[in-house]
């Protein structure tokens, strides 16, 4: 019972914010959503988070996804530089490559946004082909 002579009111307990991520201090769903930022977010959270398998999974998936996005970008730039400079047909190759580039980037952004939403909602969602590889890296199991 509080002392009636004490003028300071009692401090109410802090509200529960959900499960806190092990090493980062952020809630698991927030840390996993931030880890979904391709390559950079994944690397940062994979290094910082040592205990939370949910965050580490999304971080590894982000590293693999961001790496694939980077490799595709490099290959596309090389192809564009080579094929766009071919006399007569260069404009056709440039147009085709630009269309492929646009489709790839739209699809990649859609997958990125879906992964962030799923991570923020607390659902473990695997990106096709990339998710099983990330799971095998984090959990130590074999990819199927």
Image (cartoon, rainbow, N blue to C red):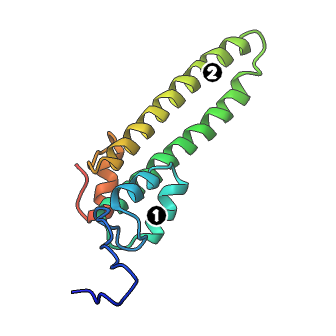
Q: CA distance from mark 2 to mark 1?
A: 33 Å
Q: Are marks 2 and 1 in contact (CB under 8 Å)?
A: no
| Mark found first going from the N terminus, 2 or 1 | 1
Crowding around mark 2 (Cα neighbors within 10 Å: few <14, some 14 to 19, many 20+) is: some
Provide residue 40's location: percent of width, then percent of height: 55, 56
**Which element carries disc 2, helix, strand or loop?**
helix
**Image quarter of the N terminus:** bottom left
Q: Is residue 28 above or below residue 69?
A: below
Which residue carries the number 2 mark? 98
Crowding around mark 1 (Cα neighbors within 10 Å: few <14, some 14 to 19, many 20+) is: many
Q: Is residue 5 above or below residue 123?
A: below
Which of pointers 2 and 1 indicates the residue nearer the eye? 1
Which residue carries the number 1 mark? 45
Residue 15: mark: none
Q: Is residue 57 above or below residue 72?
A: below
Along the line of sight, which residue is nearer the eye, 4 or 28?
4
**Which element carries disc 1, helix, strand or loop?**
helix
Provide residue 107's location: percent of width, then percent of height: 46, 29
Provide residue 103's location: percent of width, then percent of height: 51, 23
Determine which quarter of the picture holds residue 140.
bottom left
Q: Residue at x 35, y 72 (%)?
A: 22
Q: Is residue 68 left or right of residue 12?
A: right
Along the line of sight, which residue is nearer the eye, 70 or 122?
122
Along the line of sight, which residue is nearer the eye, 112 or 67?
112
Q: Residue at x 68, y 27 (%)?
A: 80
Provide residue 127's location: percent of width, then percent of height: 34, 42
Q: Is residue 68 left or right of residue 85?
A: left
Residue lying farthest to the top in this orientation: 88
């Amino acid at each position: 019972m509080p002392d009636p002579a004490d003028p300071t009111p009692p401090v109410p307990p802090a509200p529960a914010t959900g499960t806190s991520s092990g090493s980062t201090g952020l809630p698991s769903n927030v840390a996993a959503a931030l880890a979904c930022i391709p390559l950079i977010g994944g690397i940062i959270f994979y290094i910082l988070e040592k205990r939370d398998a949910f965050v580490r999974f999304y971080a590894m998936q982000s590293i693999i996804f961001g790496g694939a996005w980077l490799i595709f970008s490099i290959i596309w730039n090389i192809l564009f530089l080579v094929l766009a400079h071919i006399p007569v047909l260069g404009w056709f190759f440039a147009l085709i490559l630009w269309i492929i580039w646009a489709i790839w980037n739209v699809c990649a952004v859609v997958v990125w946004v879906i992964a962030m939403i799923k991570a923020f909602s607390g659902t473990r969602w695997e990106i096709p082909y990339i998710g099983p590889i990330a799971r095998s890296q984090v959990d130590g199991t074999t990819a199927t």
